[in-house]
Image (cartoon, coloured by chain):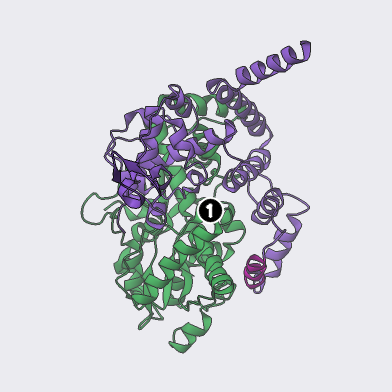
Amino acid sequence: MDNKDKYKKVAYYPGCALEGTAHAYDSSTREVGKALGLELEEVENWNCCGAMEVKNVDTKLQTYLSSRVLSIAANEMKHDVVMAPCNGCYHNLKKAEYDLAEDDASVEVVEKLSTKAGHETYKAGQIETIHALDWIKKAVGEEELEKKIENSLQGLKVANYYGCMYTRPRHIFPEKDQGEGSESIDKPHYMDDLLAVAGAENVEFPLKTACCGGAHTLSDSDMSTKLVLNILQAAEASGAEVIATECPTCHSGLEMHQVRAEKELGIKTNVKIMYFTQLLGVALGMSKRKVSIHENVSDGSKLLKEKGIG
Amino acid sequence: MPIHEKSLIRPENLVTHDQLVIDGVDVSGHWSTFIETRVVKDYNEDMQDEIAALAGGENIHRCWQCGSCTNACTINAENPDFNPRYWIYLIRMGMESELLRDKDIIWQCVSCNKCTSACPRDVVPEGVMKATAHWLELKGHTEKSSSTIFDEVFSEQVFATGKIEESRTMRRFFSRTGQPLMPSWFVEFMKRLIRYLPVKMLMHMGLATVFTPKTKKWDKARDAIEEYVAEKKAADRKALGLDKLIEQAKQEVNNIAAE
């Protein structure tokens, strides 16, 4: 296990979604960090990582966009670790790291664009990119977290949903599948571990890393609705009352197509969708409002109240 | 989900004669059913190179047809006609007319990366799907898909300002794809979404329609990116011989006019 202190103060890259529709994920992440005594320093003048879209215009341009964020965090702010709670951002920073280590043509384009844009060129290996799950796991760990749980999620049945970008493609995540303590690519468990400590009952959920169709949420809504319904219905069949998410695209995709399936197809699903940081926040003794549960489209306040949680 | 490969026997190639007598034997109806032979003559030998020149298609030559991509595919599970392995085969063989039979579904790849994760040869099938969809559009075989329009609207905003403001991206997307500004289910979603968002947040989203959020010190990066994108687009056109095609067409029009 790495040194915990290394992760107690990290650079924070919220990304565009957390400034917009995923406001609840941003605020709950910050609140949970505060409660656990962790420090986040937002990357200055950050830009969009390119999301799922820019790579279709040019792959190397996407690498450049992500490398600019890494460069600011590493060179200007002198951080060793950057944390991104959004799966898309996390994935793209990892992808940039991989490309800059493996592909000379990418290095060339990034050097050229960085010089013209007037900032230092990011070089592979300068900074470690982690997800919000890694952050809590590595900076705090289950033992320490358990001591801080004030409001157990006991009796709450949760399906943990990790989505695509957290583990795929496997080659850009060299630190995963490295034996005990590391994250698994085929069966990720970090969110399960943390929420289990918080008292939740994790159900057997087969679609942990299924795709919600997030890339085509709007451009191919029918397909997205089908894919989301697979996930919602599988979660309900597994007995889950809540789907815990760790990605703003998955989260809003699930919420949006839960509404769409109800409106357009007449298929209603009752499972609630919450960010894992919201659940952790409640378990750490925060009010539901503080972790913005009321901001979710699929509002779980009532469910938590019925369960006597928070 | 079962894996279905495409049947090589197509309904339109099945021929049955209602009335047919051969050498005095009556073979009318289904007794005379036979399959018309198919002959492929129009190989496009440049197709693989053209697709390899577009973003994502670079590694297509590495494929050895194991089928792991199709086996892992999210969309294939919903629609068996969506078959990345088969399309990569067609492209590598240069069978353009066969590929065009599926031209209207190739863009549906959701980039879940299951194929890329499963691929033992680092083909990046997900990238190949994007490159193929892009190739179909550049060559004029398909209209721009709604997915491409979304990519463009999104990328334009990132290049210009460094950041994305979602409501603006969505509005532009709906207007460019000619959809009603907001489909009814989307209105319902937005209503539920903004019900409890803090006022400050709503102000931020509302103001974003007037003042676009921007990354500070972005101007130089923007100029560098725009220059790079222009170069890249020119390179794509060159790789696909589009300028040459247009020149040829012009020449022909001139010739006809001269006559």
Q: Secondary structure at mark 1?
A: helix
Asked whether residue B8 appears in the rendered view, the answer is: no
In the image, residue B184 sits, relative to residue A112, either above or below, namely: below
Asked whether B95 or B185 is in front, the reply is B95
**Residue drawn at x 36%, y 43% as measured from the top left:** B116
Q: What range is drawn magenta here?
A: B184-192
Asked whether B56 or B43 is in front, the reply is B43
**Residue drawn at x 64%, y 55% as measured from the top left:** B166
The residue beneath circle 1 is A216
Asked whether A116 or A55 is in front, the reply is A55
Residue A283 image point, x, y percent: 42, 76
Task: Residue lying at the far front in this picture: please name it.
Answer: B24
Residue A190 image point, x, y percent: 33, 61
Q: Quadrant of residue B220?
A: top right
Residue A228 image point, x, y percent: 46, 64
Q: Quadrant of residue B238?
A: top right
Colour for chain B in the figure: purple
The subunit letter for the residue under badge 1 reads: A
Left or right: B212 in relation to A97: right
Number of marks in picture: 1
Three-letter residue code for mark 1: His
Chief SS of the magenta region: helix
**Residue drawn at x 67%, y 71% as measured from the top left:** B191
Left or right: B154 in relation to A34: right
Colour for chain A in the figure: green
**Residue drawn at x 68%, y 16% as measured from the top left:** B252
Residue A151 image point, x, y percent: 41, 81
In the image, residue B222 sits, relative to residue B231, either above or below, namely: below
Asked whether A95 or A111 is in front, the reply is A95
